[in-house]
Amino acid sequence: MSDKSIQVIEGSEVGFATTRVDALLGWARKYSLFQYPFVTACCGMEFMALASPRFDMARFGAEAPRFTPRQADLLWVVGTVSQRQAPVLKMVYDQMADPKYVLAFGTCASCGGFYDNYATVPGIDKVIPVDVYVPGCPPRPEGVIDGLLLLQDKIATGDRTPAVVKPRTDPVPKDLVSLRRSAEGDPVSEAG
Amino acid sequence: MSKVVLKRLEKRFGEAILSTHDQFGDETAVVTPEVWHEVALFLRDDSRCQMDHFIDLTAVDYLGRRTPRFEVVLHMRSMQKLHRIRVKTPVAMGPDGENPKVDSLVDVWKGANWFEREAWDMFGIEFKGHPDLRRLLMYEEFEGHPLRKDYDANKTQPLVEYREGYEKQAPFGLPEGMPFGRQVHDRWKVHVAGRQTDGKTNILGFEED
Amino acid sequence: MEPLDVELEDGELELPTDPMLLNMGPSHPAMHGTVRIVVELSGETINKADVQIGYLHRGFEKMCERGTWSQVFPYVDRLNYASPMLNNVGFALAVEKMLGVTVPERCQHYRVLLGELARICDHLVCSGAMAMELGAFTPFLYFIKARDIIWDIFEEETGARLTNSFGRVGGMAHEPSPNFKEMVRTSIPAVVDLIKDGENLVLENRIFLDRLEDVGIMSKEDAIALGWSGVVLRSTGANYDARKHHPYMTYDRYDFDVPVGQKGDNYDRFMCRQAEIRQSARIIEQALEMMADEGPVNVEDPRIILPPKEQVYNTIEGTIQHFKIVMEGIKVPAGECYSYTESGNGELGFYMVSDGSGTPWRLRIRPPSFASTAGLEQLITGQMIPDIVPTFGSINMIGGECDH
Amino acid sequence: MTLADLLLTIVKIAIILGFILNFAGLSVWADRRQSALVQHRVGPNRAVVKVPSNPLRLVIAGAAVAIGAPFGFFFWNAAPGLEQARMTTGLEIAILVGWFWMLLLSNHVRKHGADNGFDELVSRVPPRNYFYGGLAAHLLVLPLVRALPPQVWATQWAPGICGTLAFVMIAGAGFYAASKLPDGKTELRLAGTLHAAADTVKAFMKEDLAPKRADLLLYSLAPIISMTTALVTVAVVPFGSSLCFKDTNLDGMLDLHELGGLANVIDASGACPANYNTVPFMIADIDMGLLFVFAIAGTGIIGAALAGWASDSKPALLGGLRATSQMVSYEVALGLAIVGMLMICGTVNLREIVEWQGQNTWGIFAQPLAFFLFFAAAVAETKRIPFDLPEGESELGAGYFIEYSGGKWLLFMVGEYAEFVFSSALIVTLFFGGYHLPFLHGDGLHIAFGDSVLYELKMSHLSVTIIHFLAFSTKTIGFVFFHLFIRWTLPRFRYDQLMKLGWTKLLPLTLVNIMVTGAVMLAIDAGGPQVSKAMDLVADITQGILALGGLLGTVAFVTYLLEPPKRQRIVVSTSAKLADAAGGVKPSRMQA
């Protein structure tokens, strides 16, 4: 079903009603990303920080954790996926209901990182498709929020091509301390 | 500080103690595999030693450096006397490439259980008398023992299907390795990629179809 | 369903039943993503349990045999990823033990400071996650908020929030930043306040206490035989803390207590962690006083420490020295050595075999939570399914070090 | 049943279901916003709808005019006897809108800058001071209006002017807000509640999976049972007092043309005068009200049990078993906990129970122990923390609905949240006076202790009804938030602890409660008129305490909300500093 709606949006013969419905669907999916945290390793520590008050993932509607893949929309793969873990990941992905999105959190999930050996899968895209890669070992929460916003953009436009979060720096006013920064400044909001 | 333990060991076991040293301040005794279990029991129960705190059990592969090839290393500590000691025993591969064997210490210290399973998993050292010598860190279908020096660090093995319960199921995926190739959503073109899993190179080659 | 046409004898009123196998993990909210527990249930009671680890086996020991001694630091960071700085310090001490060098006193205090800050983070994550898995979400948020304050210090000092890779053989990567002491002094009271907020929510709470008390009891003898160490061992009443009993660095000069439990149940483990946070704060206060503001941080040994950047760029000796250390690694004398420190979870040991080259021949890590996870089976057998959650949470299994 | 009855019932169903469902949706969202509360703030929410500004301006201004118009229009021809009340109402509304508007404006200007001189003027006063000023004005008006001589208020123009003032304030606020909208398109965020709307749309359009070996019929039936039972029970809860329509043709039936004949003033008891038709503000005014609730809620167990069994999944089965045993156990305590209340009121009709509380005292004072027992059992019935074992997220994944996805799962969630809004409503009805407010009677405000009257204000039937509805909603919402706070704080029980609590603590206590209640009732009956008079005075005092406590609580709450959040400067993050030193890097739109 998701594929069809995507094709309609990008196709040339677009009826007014269909685009309206698709736009509504895109909007709803974008702001209601129930997540399945597939947390395995170090990045989980940053994932906790992301869910905690300072970075507050809830603002994006993407924090409600569902610990059953059936009810989740967004699969966060947080941390290294080993050879032993990979089949589990595949199983979890298969059990998710469409439309489903995958975010590779951190270098290990994106490409295996510096664990280039017999035990580690070099990137989860060897096992499941990925929508957004967030590099970093572990990535800063700001970077992950960038990734989330990128994913939201992609969902709204129906674009399923894999994308990578690029590094960027935001300007910081002189007297702004870090605690206030996420509270009010929210420079990332411009991208969303 | 822990010299007294070494002295008592030498007194008790005599010839079976191959050598002792205290390099970098760590008192060490090398014993023959035959008395391995006996030494452990003695160290735990002797009133002057009381090495009741199990610390570590592992192995080292000295491929090309020493014979016998493997050395099983045991660290322990005494809660009361604060002694620390290391006991090692050299073990060799069997004549037909059989796995080296040594007595299990699970009945001496409970904690040895997982450590021995790990040593079996990583080095292929069989512990005689171990109640449940399964692989610990790797999966059952994994072939070889990765920490042996002759196991190539890059050698990947096929992914196996997730197992419910204890029983094994057939592996899935390509027989020669992981189903490599970038997986993307259906709409997107499927890239074909290959990775040599046996050799040293591991280059991901992408190709538009 | 089978029809129930079994002939029942007099007095035999039992239905034919099979025990149920339930699989928890490896991707399960309470299993921290990396452990699988297969339990055999009778009702909700666990008859048998099989703990399977290795889902985060990343080949740490094999990777260490491929690079130089210094290149091990990033891998060490990711062992106990709740407190990377403690691992860093532990590994640096291990290599220094083989090299026979001692870092200057200022550096020792600096290492202690960063290490104790990391220990607070470690305990906060463990206690917070445990409370969260029991259903009390707010204490977790308070603890993470407190941890973020400490991470700010780490970021200021090392440039990284989590995986610092800040330790070096023979010193630290950088000397303390000018306002380091002030940052720590202002942050620690804020952290302790937040921890109090979080604790007030759970420690006065009958439900929370009922879930913890008398659940997952481990006897002292068993804990010792299992090779437990750290908080989990001390909670059983055995008094062993490497910082007290085998002091390293400047730990013998600080005045601090080692909290010891009585029963070895989940409550004791939780309380020992919380008490240890206070002790760490005490150590931090004293170390701040003792640490000199000026002075060298690294040892003055050109075979170990990289030369300053000006020398590398401007003098041929500096370039060569830099090249030798980076490309060939620090030459560690041949032999074997076991070095241990008290990490967040207990005794973190490194057993190293060197053949005299710049690369470790064998680097064995003795992970504290490996031993404690081995005891999990004994802890949960006979308990109920919900008891797995606090028991597993309180032994603080960290996948990175447990699975190597 | 006449056509008018049918129409009114449909309207009532729409209002009540709308209230329950909307509020269930909103509380889902509030449930998730806990981290923001810990940080003493509500973060900017990202769910945004872009609306063209001009139509939005029309809507805002139009709404303001529509809300304000009654005050400006009807107050000019005040009903005899109600002039003073109309005057007070008009002034109070004007003050309320005034300070609230100024406060918002001042806050807005402080954050986003001033557009004109008026903005600057307003923002010179800190937002909190507007609240304090408004509060003083609110209190001042009450004695002032009463002090005025009858020559002033008994005329037609005094209430008219006050009503017009209220109209001007409301309409002015609306127009000024409309003028503040940016040109082109406005981003509507609605405090994050749009996320709840997004959840609903998304869940219905999500793929609906079912396990291979599931029993498809029962699997599909379970969520429907779960949700329907939660919604049906609402039918017997009174959301407000009754409306009285004049029975012009005296046939005892409500006809369509009689809908215009709403009573102007009724007497203090709240009962309609003779020749008037009574329309209670509940969907079904049935005599066995409470029994109906228990009967239907008991059926809800089937939903959870079926879901657990039909899913063919081990965690689901365990969750279903837990749900069944837990709900059956606590149903007993739940039922017995309110027996004391029923004995005192002598009825199981919820409307009559509320009326009894209005005339005497709130249930919490009559049955304090029963309240706690009932509350604990009700939380257990709704399967929320600390009793959320059937879901047990960290043990069973998601418990009995672990295999559900998409729309079916949404039904479970809506059912669960509707259930807990409903249980809040039931607690309010049984123990917190339902729609009743202290000293507010059918004919207006009447503050009296025993025989000494302190303050009196006549009010029209319609305004009393509206206030009653608002009071009920506010109390329910308050309890919903109480539920949320519990969920955020408490850990969950273990299965055996749960059973022990239910059978060995709650159940005996409910029985003790029944016996004590019976004994006290007998004692009061034996005491004669002296005792019952004293009881009446005590009841009045409790009402006074409630009124005072409610006012102070509201003021404290608003003051707390207006408190600027405490933020400590601790450490400036390094990356921020680096960017700062470089003069800042221009943000660019992120690209793939």
Image (spheres, coloured by chain):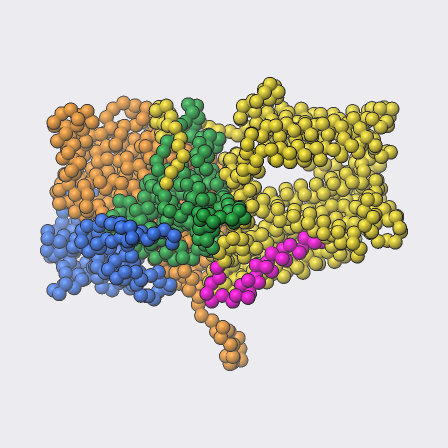
Point 14% across, 47% down: residue: B21
Question: Residue C309: horizontal and vertical position, in percent?
Answer: 20, 27
Colour in which chain D is shown? Answer: yellow
C112 in magenta: no
Q: Nearer the viewer, residue B184 or B141?
A: B184
Chain letter, orange in picture: C
Left or right, D300 with reference to C47: right
Residue C245's x, y, as percent? 29, 41
Q: Is residue C284 left or right of residue A60?
A: left
Q: Chain B is shown in which shade?
A: blue
Vertical relation: C395 (above or below) D155: below
Q: Residue at left 58%, top 47%?
A: D25
Segment tinted magenta in the rendering = D209-238
Dominant SS in magenta? helix
Number of residue marks? 0
Q: Nearer the viewer, residue C217 or A151?
A: A151
Specify the chain shown as green: A
- Residue C223 visible, this angle: no
* B13 horizontally vs A43: left or right: left
Residue that appears at 28% across and 35% down: C166
The residue lying at 54 percent from left, 57 percent from top is D408
Compared with C183, D485 (above or below) is below
Residue D213 among magenta residues: yes
**Residue C383 showing in the rendered view:** yes
The x, y position of residue A27, in whole percent, is 50, 44
Tell me: C339 left or right of D394. left
Q: In which image quadrant can residue A167 be found?
A: top left
- In this view, the residue farthest toward the front is A13
Q: Residue C352, located in which quarter of the rendered image?
A: top left
Q: Position of residue D526 (x, y in %)?
A: 82, 51
